[in-house]
Amino acid sequence: MYLRSLFGLIFLLCLSMAYAESTEVTIISYHEIADRESALVPFYTVTPTNFVRQMDWLKNNGYHFVSMDDILADRAGKKDLPPKAVLITFDDGYHSVYTYAFPILKMFHAPAVIALVGSWLNAPEQGEINFDGKKVARSELLSHDEIHEMVKSGLIEIASHTYDLHRGMLSNPQGNMEPAATARLWFPQEKRYEDQASYEKRVTADLEKNNVFLKRYTGKTPRIIVWPYGRYNIELRHIAERLGMPIGLTLDDGPDTTDTPLWGLRRILVDKTTTIWDLKSEINNRNQGYVDEGHANHIMHIDMDYIYDPDPKQTEKNLGKLLDHIQAMGIDTVYLQAFADPDGTGSATSVYFPNRRMPMRADLFNRVAWQISTRTQVKRIYAWMPLIAWIPPQSDPVAHDTLVTLPPAHRPNYVSMGYKRLSPFSPRVREFIRDMYQDLARNTPLDGILFHDDVTLSDYEDDSTFARKTYASWGLPPSVAEIRKSDDLMARWTLLKINYLDNLADNMAQIVNDEQPGLRVARNMYAQVVLNPQSETWYAQALPNSLHNYDYTAIEAFPYMEQAPDPVAFYHDLVEKVRGYPDGLRKTVFELQTIDWRTGKQVPDQELAATIKRLRSWGVQNIAFYPDDFFNNHPDPAIIRPAFEQKVDLSQP
């Protein structure tokens, strides 16, 4: 999900009703329908009995089975969809769909879409196929005659599932195999990545080949593309549209409303664990706008600088320790540093991914993110990135477009931001930031972006030439010194800066979302912004704006850094302030410090556990900690995990 603009309190209060009323269709994704003992991929297999139960429950609870033609007729204004419309889909083309699902579809008069992989079907029917890296008999998939029979019935529409992109391909120097449709390939002999032009040529050829094959094999040219593993991007979208497939079925979260584009129709993925209750809850949650099931809850904020070592073997050992710590902690979400800041200045001097503009300390982000996502229980990985705290090479002209703080003689009681930053008002800086975010998004599968706490400007910033031009365009005096002479101008300037920074972050999120659809967006925020209304002016941050514009606001609840005399009172005041906003606790992450940076000492595990339990008892849903010192087992999972897993007290007012 990218940054949203919500228009007022009334809209917020009516959000769930609006989603429910505008839901157009529910689309359900199945794979294999078979007894589990004989399943090719057991986890994504639904037994014939459970499939019948689910179809029966849908019919008996007022759902109406529809086809893609019905959806298109509704979109064209020719014929309204029935209430509670539902479309059934099957991925991969298993033989068991014909054996067990097709008879049930006929009984319930339920149209369905079946997505086919050309390279699998094109094998000799008595031979074998390469099924995601393992040899499988071709007979496990639908035969030519079975496909023709189902298509002829009028119930089944054939979709493309690509010709040969339903597999992993080498995508980084460390050997990870990632989804072929979206990965930029790594060529080890040449020690380089696939360039953008070559990537687009490769995937275009594949999709075109499958269209030609399916036309010949089934008699139908597909108009629907179903993305393998649910992974797609803006390039694939446009290519599919050019090839006559304007309809795309995804695995993105959220409801399918009348505003959902045809290229991004969302589906509910059913697996072996899905009960009738689960299916009902998932449909209801999506229809009510609760698209982030379970929401961010147990969050680990990780410094990549801790993992990196000049010796690649030591880096791999460090990564192994991190994975063990994540597993032991039971974490479900990770904020993973994508930039390098070994000196702890808060500004990026290099990054951990290939890019056009900054030095690469090591090609490591892709490796670490992929290992976390495939070897641990983590469900969501956010790339932790600066927005304007960059120190580019001096050879790049953008390095000179730094923001300007009013000179010391003009700034009594100045709250120092500390970080070296670029001017967000410079067109060259905005282009630079855009390049960095696009290169990140093209390099690694992501679930979210966490904006660094550099999304801030003090009440003495920015006084650069670029900023002055912007202020003049806003109808303000073209200098910070002049603006500061009037409380009214200061108030207007502060609000405009807050919105300008949030809009800039939104633009970057949109760029990443083009490559990583379904992106969630979080931002770090200083605790003082929440506790002291005057600090909105000091930092150009505001909690109400943040709650409206970001999926999550990660408040740095650091009592020792804030020098709070009573940490418990500090946490309580913070929670109560957040609770006062609609959806405040659901959309706020309370990030706890594990180190007292003033003394360099660890915050004791027992104290952290007590804080987490206390926050849970106050109704806090989302808790993070920073940093994670996996070398010294701090925080200790044996102490912290039970506290994390304590039930949230939702009875709090």
Image (tube, grey):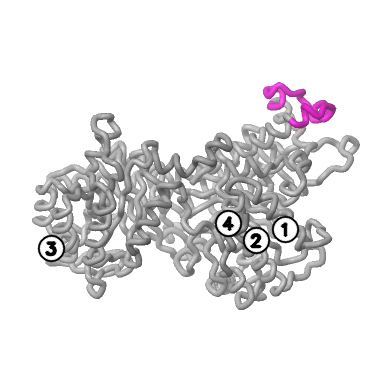
Which label's residue is closer to the chain start, 3 or 1?
Answer: 3
Residue drawn at x 48%, y 68% as measured from the top left? 377
Query: Which of these two is toward me, 192 or 444?
Result: 444
- In the structure shown, which secondary structural element does the residue marked by tag 2 occupy? loop
* In this rendering, the label closer to the viewer, 4 or 3: 3
Q: Is residue 74 visible?
A: yes
* In this rendering, the label closer to the viewer, 4 or 1: 1
- Near mark 3 (Cα within 10 A), the count class, few <14, some 14-19 or many ≥20, is some
As drawn, the label of residue 125 is 3
Q: Quick check: 59 left or right of 472?
A: left
Q: Label 4, label 1: how many angstroms apart (C-alpha)? A: 37 Å
Which label's residue is closer to the chain start, 4 or 1?
Answer: 4
Q: Are marks 4 and 3 in contact (CB under 8 Å)?
A: no
Q: Which residue is mark 4?
A: 352
The residue most toward the bottom is 638
Q: Label 3, label 1: how many angstroms apart (C-alpha)? A: 66 Å
Q: Label 2, label 4: how many angstroms apart (C-alpha)? A: 38 Å
Q: Which residues are magenta?
A: 470-491
Point out residue 63 in the picture as x, y percentages from the top left corner.
27, 49
Q: Quick check: 104 left or right of 272?
A: left
Residue drawn at x 64%, y 38% as measured from the top left? 501
Q: Is residue 385 visible?
A: no
Which label's residue is closer to the chain start, 3 or 2?
Answer: 3
Which label's residue is closer to the chain start, 2 or 4?
Answer: 4
- Near mark 4 (Cα within 10 A), the count class, few <14, some 14-19 or many ≥20, is many
Q: Are marks 2 and 1 in contact (CB under 8 Å)?
A: yes
Point out residue 150 in the picture as x, y percentages from the top left corner.
12, 52
Q: Which residue is mark 1?
A: 572
